[in-house]
């Protein structure tokens, strides 16, 4: 055989092996069920894309918060899965997660949706929660990621601080926003028993930031920054 033919055969074998490895990695992601959590390193990560379905969340110029939340959440979940973690998404589609059998009115659906999220957050003591939202304010000058943490678990503020540092360090060097403890008005954080944070990635009410948040590359950068913060938190907690 000519050297060139051997070279092509070797290259093909490498390429096929790579495809098989990637295929099995991704098909594993698709078939995760709660029963195989134990095979993964702790913590288990719950990604909560805020709002969904009939609840669009904040809205500016036809841009709906729920859609940006979902895009960033999906990217974040994929990145953390590729790092080997067990990730559950509260929703991976444009839906509200209320109980179909009991909730009827819009208010009942909203209450049921929030309760279901909290149930999932607290479904394992080994969970940590990152909830993704977007901000909106009367003054359009406001911009920048703002992070809230649950006061029920003392690790929540560590998780929030790791994400804050990562976002500021990687994509928002001029962001001076401080972490905020969540009050009773933020239901999901008020009821979370595990380490839990809400990342308000940016302000839809700020034109420049809204354009960025609609850009897929910026969404990936945001997801990457949050993922790096989550990984740093995991390392910090391990060392304590
Ligand atoms: Zn929201």
Image (cartoon, rainbow, N blue to C red):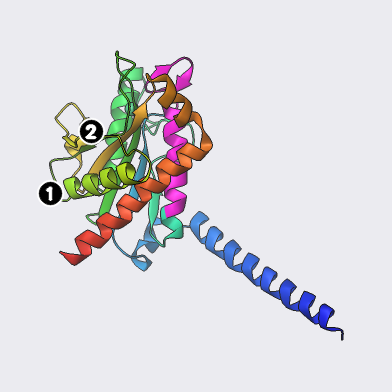
* Residue 161 visible in the snapshot: yes
Quarter of the image holding residue 26? Answer: bottom right
Q: Secondary structure at mark 2?
A: loop
Q: Quadrant of the N terminus?
A: bottom right
Q: Earlier in the sequence, mark 2 or mark 1?
A: 1
Q: Residue furthest front?
A: 174
Q: Is residue 20 left or right of residue 37?
A: right
Is residue 214 part of the magenta span, yes or no? Answer: no
Q: Nearer the viewer, mark 2 or mark 1?
A: 2
58 in relation to 192, above or below = above
- The answer to whether residue 102 is seen in the rendering is no
Q: Which label is found at residue 84?
A: none
Q: Which residue is mark 1?
A: 154
User: Quarter-wise, where is residue 110 in the image?
Assistant: top left
- 64 falls in the magenta region: yes
The magenta segment: 53-79
Residue at the spot 23% in from the left edge and 33% down from the top edge: 177
Quadrant of the snapshot with the C terminus: bottom left
Query: Which quadrant contains ligand 1?
Result: top left
Q: Nearer the viewer, residue 168 or 149?
A: 168
Query: Looking at this view, is 104 or 81 the one in front?
Result: 81
- In this view, 24 is above or below 149: below
Q: Where does residue 66 sit, x and y in percent of width and height?
A: 42, 28
**Left or right placement of residue 90 versus residue 211 in this view:** left
Task: Give the structural element (helix, strand or loop) at label 1.
Answer: loop
Q: Residues within 10 Å of mark 2 (few under 14, many from 20)?
A: few
Q: Which residue is mark 2?
A: 177
Q: Residue 156 location in percent, x, y? A: 19, 46
Pointer 1 residue Cβ closer than 8 Å to ligand 1: no
């Amino acid at each position: 055989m000519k050297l060139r033919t051997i070279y092509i055969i070797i290259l093909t074998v490498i390429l096929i092996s790579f495809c098989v490895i990637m295929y099995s990695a991704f098909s594993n992601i698709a078939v995760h069920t709660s029963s195989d959590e134990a095979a993964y390193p702790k913590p288990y990560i719950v990604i909560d894309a805020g709002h969904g379905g009939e609840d669009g969340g904040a809205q500016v110029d036809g841009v709906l918060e729920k859609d940006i939340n979902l895009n960033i959440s999906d990217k974040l979940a994929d990145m953390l899965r590729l790092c080997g973690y067990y990730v559950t998404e509260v929703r991976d589609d444009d839906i509200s997660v209320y109980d179909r059998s009991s909730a009827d009115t819009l208010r009942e659906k909203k209450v049921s949706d929030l309760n279901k999220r909290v149930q999932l957050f607290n479904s394992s003591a080994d969970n940590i929660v990152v909830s993704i939202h977007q901000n909106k304010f009367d003054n359009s000058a406001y911009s920048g990621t703002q992070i809230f943490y649950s006061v029920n678990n003392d690790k929540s503020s560590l998780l929030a601080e790791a994400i804050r540092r990562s976002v500021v360090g990687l994509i928002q060097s001029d962001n001076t926003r401080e972490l905020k403890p969540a009050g009773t008005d933020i239901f999901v954080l008020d009821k979370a028993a595990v380490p839990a944070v809400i990342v308000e990635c940016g302000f839809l009410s700020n034109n420049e930031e809204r354009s960025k948040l609609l850009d897929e590359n910026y969404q990936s950068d945001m997801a990457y920054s949050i993922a790096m913060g989550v990984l740093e938190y995991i390392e910090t907690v391990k060392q304590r």
